[in-house]
């Protein structure tokens, strides 16, 4: 490496510019590929962008921390974006009022199913207790899930990864489940996807329709609150 | 656009203050979302500026999960040790949750609709 290149590298490694630019480039590339595949759910933009970035960081031996120093500016926007979900939600106000009771009942059932089925399968296959507890809040949006994991004795950073993976699985797989079960109402499709796959499911739902996105956003918000209230009470009973 | 972004940040900040002030287990942005929803219900809908900004932000919601998702590289060790229970649990639970929630909600909506549809 010539001294000049070394100087450039020192600058790039210390500045957030590189991590930020790489995140946007990876996402643009992933979106392009997603479109090229005709919007196929397997070509999920989050999955593609994350795979590209992990491969790149791994090949260049760059620590995640260094990358995140730049990428945190994108990460920060999750906060205002969560607040902005109130707007599509408001557009569905009339329908929400009509469906209040069915939505509330499905919320409780969906929330418990998400946590208990994950713990049951992991426990049957012999996962450690810390892993089981990290799995319990996996259907909840990342910031809430990490808070819950900490409270019930899981590993918050492992939970973050499981949450993202769950989101991608739901975003990719939901359409096959809906086809098999003949679920056609966009409100139902969105709500169930939001319960199981939080923000990534919601992002996927918005690609299908505004209504599906709004119900996914509602489900994500409600499930975050419901799981935060339920798990600290339910988990000690289940795992003793 | 700046006005709309300011508004979103103000609501997030308010949510953050409430969450911490009362020691709630719910994150600030979710409380901010609830507050903004309430505000919209009282005001009777968002301004054009707010609606457009929200739409722009939410259209690329996927992008915002990329930095946290890349954190998967920190957990390769545990994940390779326990890959089977982890993978099976996530696959089964995600599918079951989507299926159960969708079927229950569909049945309940159907049930509450029937009396209204009767003459």
Image (tube, coloured by chain):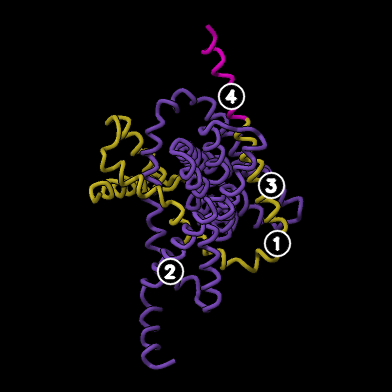
Distance (Cα) linking label 4 and label 3: 24 Å
Residue A175, quarter of picture: top right
Which chain did the renderer colour purple?
A
Distance (Cα) linking label 2 and label 1: 31 Å
Tag shown at residue B93? none
Helix, strand or loop at label 1? It is loop
Residue A225 in view, yes or no: no
The image shows residue A216 at horizontal and vertical percentages of 49, 40
Residue A77 in view, yes or no: yes
Tag shown at residue B92? 3
Helix, strand or loop at label 3? It is helix
Helix, strand or loop at label 2? It is helix
Q: Which circle's residue, 1 or 4, is located before the other in the chain? A: 1
Tag shown at residue B108? 4
Decide whether residue B105 is among the magenta residues. yes
Residue at (48% x, 37% y) in the render: A212
Q: Which circle's residue, 4 or 3, is located before the other in the chain? A: 3
| Chain under numbered label 3 | B
Q: Which residues are magenta?
A: B104-119
Magenta region, main secondary structure: helix
Tag shown at residue A22? 2
Q: Which residue is mark 1?
A: B82
Decide whether residue A204 is among the magenta residues. no
Which chain did the renderer colour yellow?
B
Residue A179, quarter of picture: top right
The image shows residue B19 at horizontal and vertical percentages of 39, 46
Q: Are marks 2 and 4 in contact (CB under 8 Å)?
A: no
In the displayed structure image, the side of residue B78 where residue A3 appears, left or right: left
Question: Could you confirm whether marks 3 and 2 are on the same chain?
Answer: no
> Disc 2 or disc 1, which is closer to the eye?
2
Helix, strand or loop at label 4? It is helix
Residue placed farthest to the top in the image? B119
């Amino acid at each position: 490496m010539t001294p000049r290149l070394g100087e450039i590298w020192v600058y790039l490694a210390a500045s957030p510019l590189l991590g930020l630019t790489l995140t946007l480039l990876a996402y643009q590339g992933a979106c392009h590929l997603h479109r090229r595949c005709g919007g196929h759910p397997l070509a999920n933009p989050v999955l593609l962008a994350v795979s590209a970035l992990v491969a790149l960081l791994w090949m260049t031996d760059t620590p995640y921390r260094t990358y995140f120093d730049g990428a945190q500016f994108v990460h920060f926007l999750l906060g205002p974006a969560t607040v902005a979900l109130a707007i599509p939600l408001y557009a569905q106000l009339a329908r929400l009022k009509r469906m209040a009771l069915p939505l509330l009942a499905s919320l409780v059932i969906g929330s418990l199913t998400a946590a208990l089925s994950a713990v049951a399968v992991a426990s049957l296959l012999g996962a450690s207790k810390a892993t089981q507890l990290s799995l319990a809040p996996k259907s909840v949006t990342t910031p809430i899930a990490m808070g819950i994991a900490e409270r019930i004795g899981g590993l918050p950073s492992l939970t973050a990864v499981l949450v993202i993976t769950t989101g991608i699985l739901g975003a990719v797989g939901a359409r096959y489940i809906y086809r098999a079960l003949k679920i056609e109402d966009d409100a139902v499709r969105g709500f169930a996807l939001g319960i199981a796959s939080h923000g990534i499911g919601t992002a996927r739902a918005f690609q299908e329709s505004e209504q599906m996105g709004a119900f996914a956003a509602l489900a994500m918000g409600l499930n975050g609150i419901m799981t935060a209230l339920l798990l600290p009470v339910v988990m000690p009973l289940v795992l003793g | 656009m700046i006005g709309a972004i300011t508004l979103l940040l103000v609501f997030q900040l308010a949510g953050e203050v409430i969450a911490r002030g009362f020691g709630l287990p719910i994150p600030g942005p979710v409380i901010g979302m609830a507050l903004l929803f309430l505000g919209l219900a009282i005001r009777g809908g968002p301004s054009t500026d707010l609606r457009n900004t929200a739409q722009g932000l939410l259209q690329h919601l996927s992008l915002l999960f990329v930095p946290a998702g890349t954190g998967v590289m920190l957990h390769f060790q545990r994940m390779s040790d326990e890959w089977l229970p982890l993978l099976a649990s996530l696959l089964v639970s995600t599918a079951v949750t989507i299926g159960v929630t969708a079927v229950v909600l569909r049945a309940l909506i159907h049930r509450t609709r029937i009396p209204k549809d009767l003459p």
